[in-house]
Image: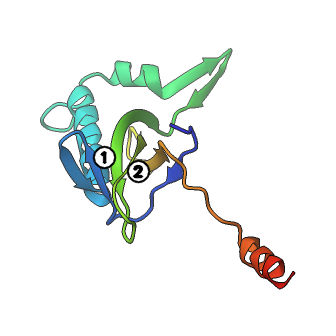
């Protein structure tokens, strides 16, 4: 892994995680739905009332003396080895997937999922100036 993560924005790209493959859009939806459901299950009863109001309150604020700083969201981060098939690419690329899921406890903000990929091998890209350098060398 080269530790340089690139944001994946094309929802039609495909990820292979172990034996399971997912379009990026489906993986985002699965992660968002799973964590939202777990969050709801932990803190709400079947009628939607808070079961553990005090517990969620423990996470909602950070006290600094007399000042309370309120949390707007919880972030869950995951790393896993995978393979990526980008639209228009030549084939699968091995690397590491970094997924961050943001859950807003009281739905003040929409839940969101950010996915990044770090390839195991980085393709060396030619500089746009390489063509000009080749022309100059050929003229000599």
Mark 2 lies on residue = 112
Quarter-of-image position of residue 56: top left
**Is 71 rendered above or below residue 114?**
above
What crowding class fits label 1: few (fewer than 14 Cα within 10 Å), some (14-19), or many (20 or more)? some
In terms of image quadrants, where is residue 135?
A: bottom right
- The reply to whether residue 100 is visible in this rendering is no
Residue 25 image point, x, y percent: 30, 59
Q: Is residue 105 visible?
A: yes
**Residue 115, x across and y down, in percent:** 43, 49
- Real-space CA distance between mark 2 and mark 1, rounded to the nearest whole angstrom: 7 Å
133, 25: nearer the viewer: 133
Residue in view at x 40 percent, y 65 percent: 10
Query: Which secondary structure lies at badge 2?
Result: strand
Query: Where residue 100 sits in the image (x, y, percent)?
Result: 43, 41
Screen quadrant of the C terminus:
bottom right
- The reply to whether callout 2 and callout 1 are in contact (CB within 8 Å) is yes
For label 1, the residue is: 32
């Amino acid at each position: 892994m080269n530790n340089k993560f690139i944001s994946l924005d094309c929802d039609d790209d495909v990820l292979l995680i172990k034996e399971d493959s997912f379009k990026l859009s489906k993986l985002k939806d699965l992660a968002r739905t799973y964590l939202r459901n777990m969050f709801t299950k932990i803190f709400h009863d079947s009628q939607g009332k808070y079961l553990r109001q005090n517990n969620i309150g423990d996470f909602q604020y950070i006290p600094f003396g007399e000042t309370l700083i309120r949390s707007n969201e919880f972030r869950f981060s995951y790393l896993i080895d995978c393979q990526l098939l980008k639209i228009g690419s030549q084939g699968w690329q091995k690397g590491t997937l970094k997924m961050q899921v943001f859950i807003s406890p009281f739905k003040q903000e929409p839940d969101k999922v950010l996915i990044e990929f770090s390839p195991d091998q980085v393709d060396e890209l030619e500089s746009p100036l390489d063509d000009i350098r080749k022309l100059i060398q050929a003229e000599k």
